[in-house]
Amino acid sequence: MNLFLRSLAKLLALLSLGFFMAACTAKSGSDTADLTWQPEEINGKKTYAELVVGYSQIGAESEWRIGNTASILEAAENLGVELLFSDGQQRQENQIRAIRTFIAQRVDVIGVSPVVETGWESVFQEAKDAGIPIILVDRRAAVSEDLYTAYLGSDFIEEGKNAGRVMVDLLGGEGHIIELVGTVGSAPALDRYAGFREIIQEYPGMKIIASESGDFTRAKGEEVMADLLKLYGDEIDAVYAHNDDMAIGAIRAIEAYGLKPGEDIKIVSIDAIRDAFQMMIDGKLNATIECNPLLGPQFFELALKVANGEPVPKWIPSEEGVFFPEDAAEIMPLRRY
Ligand code: GYE
């Protein structure tokens, strides 16, 4: 993790219990020489300087999430948007409380990354009744389309399929796979589970011998993998982890068990964080499927349009690739998360 992200993570940890103003708009005083002054409205339309956005983040479970939070805070500051940011610490009830607070504060737009898919109807309906649009960022919610304005995020099914395709190649269509699942009930865990199976079901020799949640964290990935190694040991040919952090945890467990990750046990994961590139350079990870967390600039562009009543697409998907060890050294310095 680079220094900037590290300090951001610390700041977030310190402030995680409440709300904070991530950025204050450069409001003009009487000083006409102030070059940062921006008009509040042009032709009756809001500008970034007038936009007030509430954002309910999930937590800080992974490097991906830390990169995602940094992107949102940075973009708000660069654009001069007033951002009310809340860290839900992985709990849906905290996120629901934050959304209710944003409604009471009468923000222009609410951004939310729902920790799990279900259970959002009532609070989204409350926002709708108050005339405040909801934009889903990163993760979907299982609600009817009239309860949110747009979804900005990845195609998690496609990510799961890409992981499946890479796994078929690595194992030559045959082998015993351990799956480390993300947060139970979250959109990425459900879709990465389904997408992977869509591909490997075509290969009768590919068998998922265990599928357990590591909650998207390194610590849990390591713990679950250590338990599964005790149960299955040498029978394991490969690990499919729903994110890189759990794969890195699994790598530690495999080494502690005395096997070689990347060789004895092939590993494919998702996110493409910087540490995953290091693991590929070290020969311990066989591939990572990209999932882009740098959604801040796109999110605020969307929020401004929505606040001004302009039409926006219902789903704005991110463009993503697949990375392998042979290119890791060249690409790693370019990675921003
Ligand atoms: O893959 C994982 C994070 O929702 C896409 O959440 C995101 C996932 C990401 O914790 O690392």
Image (tube, rainbow, N blue to C red):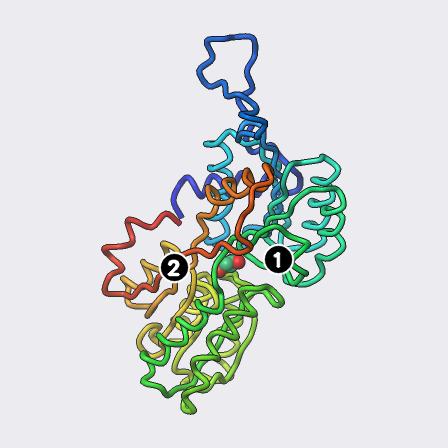
Q: Nearer the viewer, mark 2 or mark 1?
A: 2
Residue 293 higher or lower than 83, as above or below = below
Element under disc 1:
loop
For residue 144, which numbered disc appears in the image?
none
Q: Position of residue 326 (x, y in %)?
A: 23, 65
Classify residue 51 by image quadrant. Answer: top right
Q: Tell which of 52 and 178 is nearer to you.
A: 52
For residue 320, which numbered disc appears in the image?
2
Q: Position of residue 149 (x, y in %)?
A: 61, 50
Give the amino acid at mark 2. Answer: Glu
- Mark 1 CB lies closer than 8 A to ligand 1: no
Q: Position of residue 298 (x, y in %)?
A: 47, 44
Q: Tell which of 48 and 169 is nearer to you.
A: 48
**Furthest residue in direction bottom, as rendered:** 204
Per the image, the residue denoted by label 1 is 115
Residue 20 higher or lower than 179, as above or below = above
Give the amino acid at mark 1. Answer: Val
Residue at position x 62%, y 67% from top? 185
Q: Position of residue 242 (x, y in %)?
A: 48, 67
Q: Dot 2: few (<14), some (14–19), or many (≥20) neighbours within 10 Å? A: some
Task: Of the two numbered discs 2 and 1 on the same chain, state the one appearing first in sequence.
Answer: 1
